[in-house]
Structures are given as structure tokens and as C-alpha cells.
Image: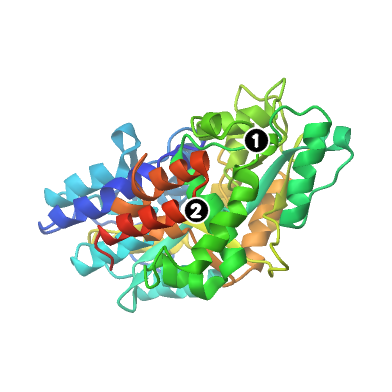
Amino acid sequence: MSLKMRNLAVTAIAATSLLSVAACGSSSSSGDSGSGSSPSGQSLKGVSFTILGQWTGGEQDAFQAVIDAFDKKTGAKGTYTPAAGGDEAGVLGTKVAGGTPPDIAVLSLPGAIAQYASANKIQPASAAVQSAVSANFATEWGTLASAGGKLYGVPVDASDKSTVWYNAKAFTNAGITPPATWDDLIKAGKTLSASGVQVPISVGGGDGWTLTDWFENVYLRTAGVDLYDKLTKHQIPWTDPSVATALTTLKQIWGDPELIGSPAAAVKVPFTSSVDNVFKKTPTSAIVYEASFVATTITSDKNPAKVGTDAKVFPFPSINGSAPVSEAAGDFAVAFTPNKAAQPFLAYLASPEAAKILVSTSGSGFLSVNKNLANSAYPDATSGDLAKQLVDVGNNFRFDMSDQAPAAFGGTPNKTEWGDLQTFLVNGNVAAAQQQLEKDAKSVKWN
């Protein structure tokens, strides 16, 4: 599975607390200049720059290929380092606090960009970066990478978090097709159960962030984007009737043992296992909801399934006639120092050329929302289709709610929102869940 997504949680946990101690000045690590030049003509030969992220494996290889292409083009020398233990936020916070930040870091949380910007720890985007982002991305992606009216970051990759994955053979055996509505999803689950599937819908409740994604998709479709935005900022309480509606809707699936098995068992299933249950050699489930990055888990050694053939996907279903809308997440590259190569590299990252290298490198699993990247760049049709969905939706998407919340509320394993939804998964008490969610939301500071 993608380390990037496994560690969204880790990034969220540390972001707020570490920013509070990041009070030291930043430093530049510019190298010597020479005759090489950036795409804008700036001399970069001999300039070394550092990048901190959390990608390893195939993702690291793909990102390194982008760095290598930039280095070849400009004469610069970029060095990427994955954070020790995957704790990118923790490592970054320590480096910033110690006055030795990387020249560039990759952040998963728009809120972290705003917090670092307010502390004057990151560099505003150059005119070239602004131009590249404006030309290649929907306006909302630039907004997410901005703070105080200034652009700071470049969208590197994205995840479509409104996708439902299914075992094609199990659907064929049950005589069903991908459901388009919530009611049809429930019916499909019942039919799969009748056909002999042990646990039709695999829920990875052991990793609480999966439950926030379930909630957010249901809330988008039952409450709409305006209330979603308000709840994201805690401008309405979690005791609002709209939250009750979403939780009650969720309970139609989470509270039905015929669909998810024992809720007490589901709350112990890790995300990776929830995927394995659907696509392993002898599957016990047929459906798993999670984002486009599920593809990198499906193709692990445990699972013989092939994406696009054995493992297929359909959009998160409409609820009560709700219009199409997507939830998304992503990573943003931000410059922490005035290194001579930093802004040119960010501008290159925003280009279709860099996006093509990123998504086409074998084993990367990356998707890009660069609207000028051809779908043919993707290694398989399913990945291309998922990327197209994110691009085609334009600004009609919302970023992951819990990733925008203060980390103490939206990103703590087994506590606050994650823990509250895990408790709700088990006991199904809507009113109690709302009260606890609101109590926990009030206990943290909101921007």
C-alpha cells in the first residue's frame, strides 16, 4: 500500500503541535551557481536543494524520476529524503524549529500551509509558479495551496476519495451491476450476501481515518457543499440535524451485520486488510470503499487481482438524488527556503511534463489533477478514468474534511473524531456520537 496515504494520519497528528514550536528562522542551502539554467532561463548549474517527503517504494521512485528530469534540464541537484518512520510532519517540525528546514517539503494538509505561512516559515510562490498553477490546475487546487491571499504550494498528486472498489467476479456471480444510488448499494450488499459472500462490504474500521472518509462522503451527499464547508470549519456544531441525518444514513450499512459482519469485528480491521478481504485469492468480501489509492494495495503481493479487470470501481453513490460531487485529498510541495532552485522546481512540478513522469513511472500509483495531462499517460485505463473524474469535476469537489480540521480533532488515532466514529460504528448511537463529537470539537482551537 501507498505509504503516502497510510501516513496521512501521522501528518495530521503532528502538524498543529509542531507548528507551535517552529519559531526559529529558516535557512537557505543554496549551492554555487554555474551555466545550467532553469526553464525560465535562471542559472542553476551546481545548485543543490533538498526535498523532504514521506514517499517510499514506487512512489519515491516516481518522484525521484521527476527530480532527475529537472536536474538534467537545469544542472541543479535535488536530493529527496523520506522522513524517518514516515513521520514527515514530525521530522519537518523538528527541522523548522531547529532552523534547518529542507528547501522544499511535501505537505498533505492545507491547514499546515496556512499555519506555516502565518509563522512566516514558508516562501510565497514566484510569478512563474503562480502562472504554472493557474494554467494547469482548477482554481480550487490553487486556493487550497494558498494562505492570506498568497499562493505557496503546488499540487503534486491527488486522490479521488469518492470511489468504491469491487470484486468483478463476485458481482458477476451474484448477477448484479455497480449501484448508482445508496439504496442500490444496500440492495447489492444483500444480494451478495444471498449469493454466499461472507461479509459483502468490507469496512476497515481499525484505521479511524477510513470512517471519517465514509462520513464525509455521506455528509456531502445528504447535507450539501455549503454545510460541508461550515462543518469543516466548525461554524455549525456536530449536534446539527444535518450530522444526525448523515450518521443515521451511515447506520443503514454500518449497523447491518448482513452487510458488514459484526461491527465489533469491523472496528478492528486495518485498512489494508479491508482491501485484502475483497481481492485476496479467496475473498471473503466483495466491496470496499476507499480512495483511488486502494489500487496500490490491490496490486500487492497478497492479492492476485488486476486493477481494471478483477478489481473495478464505481463512484460513491448518490443519496436521495444528490448531484455528483467528489471528495479529494492530495499533497502540496512548498518551499521553506529561498534556495535558488526551489521556485523553479515548484514551477516544473506544476507542468504537464512533470505530471506525466510522476504518473507513468512503474509502480507509482499516483494521480494528477493537472488538467493539461493526457489520460494516455496513465499505465492503465482505471487510473486514467479516476484522474479524469477529478479533473472533470473542476471546482465541484471538496477536500477531505478531517485533513482540514485541527490535527487534535481530525487526525488522532483512536481519539476525538476517529475514536468517536469507531465507537459509533460499534454501538450505532447517533445522539451520543453527536454529543461526543461536539465535545471533542470544542476542546481544540479552530482557525
Q: Is residue 316 visible?
A: yes
Task: Report the label total.
Answer: 2
Q: Sequence order check: which comes first, mark 2 or mark 1?
A: 1
Quadrant the C terminus occupies:
bottom left
- The residue shown at (52%, 61%) is 244
Q: Amino acid at mark 1?
A: Pro
**349 or 222, nearer to the observer:** 222
Instruction: Name the residue beneath numbered marker 1.
Output: 257
- Left or right of 420: which side holds 396? right
Q: Which mark is residue 304?
A: none
- The residue shown at (59%, 52%) is 250
**Helix, strand or loop for disc 2:** helix
Circle 2 packing at 10 Å, graded few (<14), some (14-19), many (20+), is some
Q: Which mark is residue 430?
A: 2
- Percent x, y of residue 161: 57, 53
Q: Is residue 27 visible?
A: no
